[in-house]
Image (tube, helix red, strand yellow):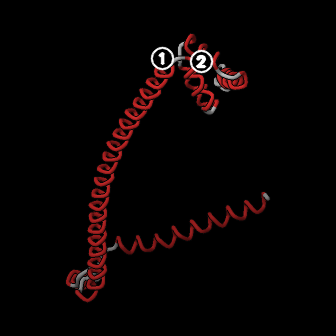
């Protein structure tokens, strides 16, 4: 391995020496002053490719590039305007959606409170009825439905109605009342 590193290092040094030697000749040529006839001929002729035929392809390429850039800028402006319009429309629709959601919440709140008022009123009606008449109605009700009303009544009114029910109906409603909150988390 040391031998191959030495060979590579030697090649690099040889390459550097050749480059320095080759460039030194050009440097010495530049240092020497041109002859007066050569100096006049050199200064009379323009340096590089300055004829219009030589520059035309470059100018055409630059003009084409400038046109492409202008087109891209125009396209970007158009897209930005479209995005701005879309963003404005989205904001407008979001505001309308928020307003509709608030109206729906308000409507649901009114409906919930109206339903609650109806249940309270009906519970009060059953509680103020004669227990025997209310018991006859509760016998015909679905046990879960009847348990809901009895659970909302004062205990004295509910007890008077339960006393008028058949033992089977009273037992079923009692089980419903006892099990209503059984599934509620305790922690």
Residue 64 screen position, x and y as percent: 29, 79
Judged left or right of residue 97, residue 141 is: right
User: Which residue is found at the position 43% from the left and 29% from the top?
Assistant: 118
User: Which residue is found at the position 69% from the left and 26% from the top?
Assistant: 169
Residue bearing mark 2 = 161
Q: Secondary structure at mark 2?
A: helix
Which quadrant: the N terminus? bottom right
Q: Residues within 10 Å of mark 1 (few under 14, many from 20)?
A: few
Residue 183's image quarter? top right
Residue 132 screen position, x and y as percent: 58, 19
Counting every numbered tag in the picture gives 2
Q: Residues within 10 Å of mark 2 (few under 14, many from 20)?
A: many
Which quadrant: the C terminus? top right
User: Which residue is found at the position 46% from the left and 22% from the top?
Assistant: 125
Q: Nearer the viewer, residue 109 or 26?
A: 109
Q: Nearer the viewer, residue 55 or 78?
A: 78
User: Which residue is found at the position 40% from the left and 36% from the top?
Assistant: 108
Q: Secondary structure at mark 1?
A: helix
Residue 25 screen position, x and y as percent: 45, 73
Q: Nearer the viewer, residue 84 or 168?
A: 168
- Answer yes or no: is residue 22 visible: yes
Q: CA distance from mark 2 to mark 1?
A: 10 Å
Mark 2 or mark 1: whose residue is earlier in sequence:
1
Q: Nearer the viewer, residue 125 or 69?
A: 125
Residue bearing mark 1 = 128
């Amino acid at each position: 391995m040391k031998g191959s590193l030495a060979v590579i290092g030697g090649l690099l040094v040889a390459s550097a020496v050749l480059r320095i030697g080759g460039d030194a000749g050009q440097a010495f040529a530049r240092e020497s002053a041109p002859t007066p006839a050569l100096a006049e001929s050199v200064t009379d002729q323009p340096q590089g490719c300055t004829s219009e035929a030589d520059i035309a392809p470059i100018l055409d390429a630059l003009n084409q590039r400038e046109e492409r850039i202008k087109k891209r800028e125009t396209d970007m402006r158009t897209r930005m305007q479209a995005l701005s319009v879309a963003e404005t429309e989205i904001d407008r629709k979001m505001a309308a959606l928020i307003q509709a959601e608030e109206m729906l919440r308000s409507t649901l709140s009114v409906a919930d409170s109206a339903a609650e008022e109806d249940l309270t009123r009906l519970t009060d009606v059953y509680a103020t009825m004669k227990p025997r008449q209310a018991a006859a109605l509760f016998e015909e009700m679905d046990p879960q439905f009847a348990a809901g009303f009895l659970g909302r009544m004062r205990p004295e009114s509910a007890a008077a109605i339960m006393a008028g029910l058949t033992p089977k109906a009273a037992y079923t409603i009692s089980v419903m009342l006892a099990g209503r909150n059984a599934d509620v988390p305790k922690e």
